[in-house]
Image: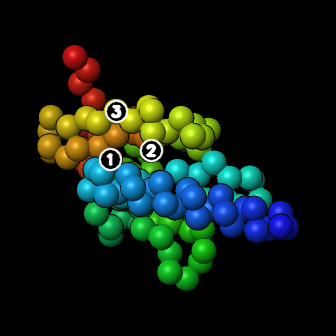
């Protein structure tokens, strides 16, 4: 009923979609199309494996990822909204063979290799 409750619902829906993508691709991805009141924070932590986002267990809304992962991430994914499922474009990296959805990435977040388009 309150605005806060609406936002929580958006968060839940978003997380559910993220979870589905994770199941589909075997990789953790996320998106955020929430109001600016909810900030998505990504803290660089180079001790983690590349290509994944780890939610902070301490700070809600904070995620950790390597610098390479952060740079590889397209910053406009937050604006995709509900078109995200239709835009899904799986790509297998020629260098490291990881399968990812290139709508989220500027280059391979796992090994740093550029995408080769046919
Ligand atoms: Zn790669």
Element assignment for label 2: loop
Name the one closer to the observer, 7 or 69.
7
Mark 1 is surrounded, within 10 Å at the Cα level, by few (under 14), some (14 to 19) or many (20 or more) other residues, namely many
Labelled disc at residue 79: none
Vertical placement of residue 74 versus 34, above or below: above
Coloring scheme of the render?
Answer: rainbow
Measured Cα–Cα span from mark 1 to mark 2: 7 Å
**For residue 26, side relative to residue 80 (left or right):** left
* Residue on which the image places disc 3: 89
User: In which quarter of the view is residue 112 placed?
Assistant: top left
**Residue 68 placed where, x, y %?**
37, 50
Measured Cα–Cα span from mark 3 to mark 1: 15 Å
* Residue on which the image places disc 1: 109
**Residue 33 placed where, x, y %?**
63, 48
Q: Earlier in the sequence, mark 3 or mark 1?
A: 3
User: In which quarter of the view is residue 18 placed?
Assistant: bottom left
Disc 3 to disc 1: CB gap under 8 Å: no
**Residue 88 placed where, x, y %?**
39, 35
Disc 1 to disc 2: CB gap under 8 Å: yes
Q: Residue furthest top?
A: 118
Element assignment for label 3: loop
Q: Is mark 1 within 8 Å of ligand 1?
A: yes
Q: Earlier in the sequence, mark 1 or mark 2?
A: 2
**For residue 28, side relative to residue 80 (left or right):** left
* Residue on which the image places disc 2: 73
The reply to whether residue 21 is in sight is: yes
Q: Earlier in the sequence, mark 2 or mark 3?
A: 2
């Amino acid at each position: 009923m309150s605005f806060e409750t609406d936002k929580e619902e958006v968060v839940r829906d978003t997380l559910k979609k993220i979870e589905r993508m994770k199941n589909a691709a075997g990789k953790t991805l996320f998106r955020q199309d929430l109001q600016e009141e909810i900030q998505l924070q990504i803290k660089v932590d180079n001790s983690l494996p590349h290509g994944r986002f780890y939610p902070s267990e301490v700070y809600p809304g904070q995620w950790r990822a390597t610098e390479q992962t952060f740079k590889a991430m397209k910053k406009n994914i937050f604006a995709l909204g509900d078109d995200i499922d239709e835009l899904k474009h799986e790509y297998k990296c020629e260098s490291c063979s990881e399968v990812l959805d290139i709508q989220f990435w500027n280059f391979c977040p796992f090994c740093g290799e550029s995408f080769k388009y046919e």
